[in-house]
Image (spheres, helix red, strand yellow):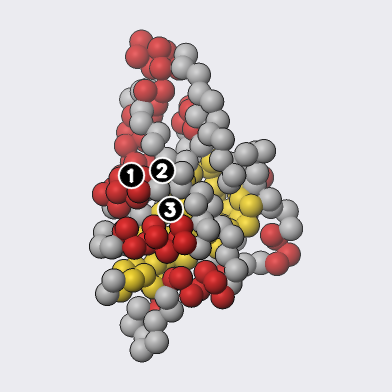
Amino acid sequence: MLLNIMGGQQKFSPLDHILLNNNPTYYISSENKVNESEIKNFNQIINYIAVTSYNDDWILKEAKDEKNPIYLKDYIVTNSLKKVALFVDSRIHLGALVKILIDAGLNEEVIIFANEQKIIIELKKMAPRWLFAANPSQKMRIKIMDSIWLSSISNYDFDFYIFDPEKELELSPQLVKELKKRHKKILIKASPSSLEKQSSFDGLFLI
């Protein structure tokens, strides 16, 4: 309990970042999920794409088994993407992925989703100004710490927390407080049952 009290006295400054400044609301969505009537209510509208390595390059994961794969670099140009959220499922050729995005002018305007912690660690080294969403193991760790009243000294080494109401219990008030104190953005994974709750979050995540 003493450790939690001491941790609770810490102060945190927000990260100065183009995707975080001015307290924006987020609409992160795959292309086929975009609802034109909804997006007008959000400041940051960001395409979500799942990508995977392919030979020495990167392609859209949905097209991996097709005869004509969609290369990420071509997709970015074709769709004039100025910011992007990527789900990365491969540890191979991460340097090539970084080069594709940097060459496209996406030096900061990138949010990375990845289940493997090693992917996140490597990409943070290569692109320290990119942003990252909490992966399953990170989410589990902070919830365990919260359950034993140690949320204030837990490691919050991410920028976005995606809350999935279909798979998770409600976040405790203490954990929400800690996330907000550290200026983490909490998005809700949207479903018909969750849309009514969206006003209490920093935005929507639709895939």
Neighbourhood count class around disc 2 (C-alpha, 10 Å): few under 14, some 14–19, many 20 upward: few
The residue lying at 41 percent from left, 17 percent from top is: 7
Identified by mark 1, the residue type is Lys
Mark in front: 1 vs 3: 1
Question: Which residue is pictured at 33% across the width and 25% down the height?
Answer: 148
How many tags in the picture? Answer: 3
Relative to 11, residue 102 above or below = below
Mark 3 closeness class: few <14, some 14–19, many ≥20 residues within 10 Å: many
- Asked which secondary structure carries label 2, the reply is loop
Q: Does the image show residue 155?
A: yes
Q: What residue type is labelled 3?
A: Ile
Instruction: Measuring from the top left, give residue 109's x and y in whole percent.
Output: 53, 52
Q: Which mark is residue 128?
A: 2
Across and down, in percent, residue 65 comes to: 33, 82
The crowding category of the residue bearing disc 1, from other C-alpha atoms within 10 Å (few below 14, some 14 to 19, many at least 20), is few
Picture coordinates of residue 96, whole percent (x, y): 34, 63
Residue 180 located left or right of residue 155: right
Which mark, residue 112? Answer: 3
Residues under numbered marks 2 and 1 in contact, where contact means CB atoms less than 8 Å apart: yes
* Residue at left offset 47%, top offset 65%: 49
- If you read the primary sequence from the N terminus, does the residue marked by circle 1 or circle 3 appear first? 3
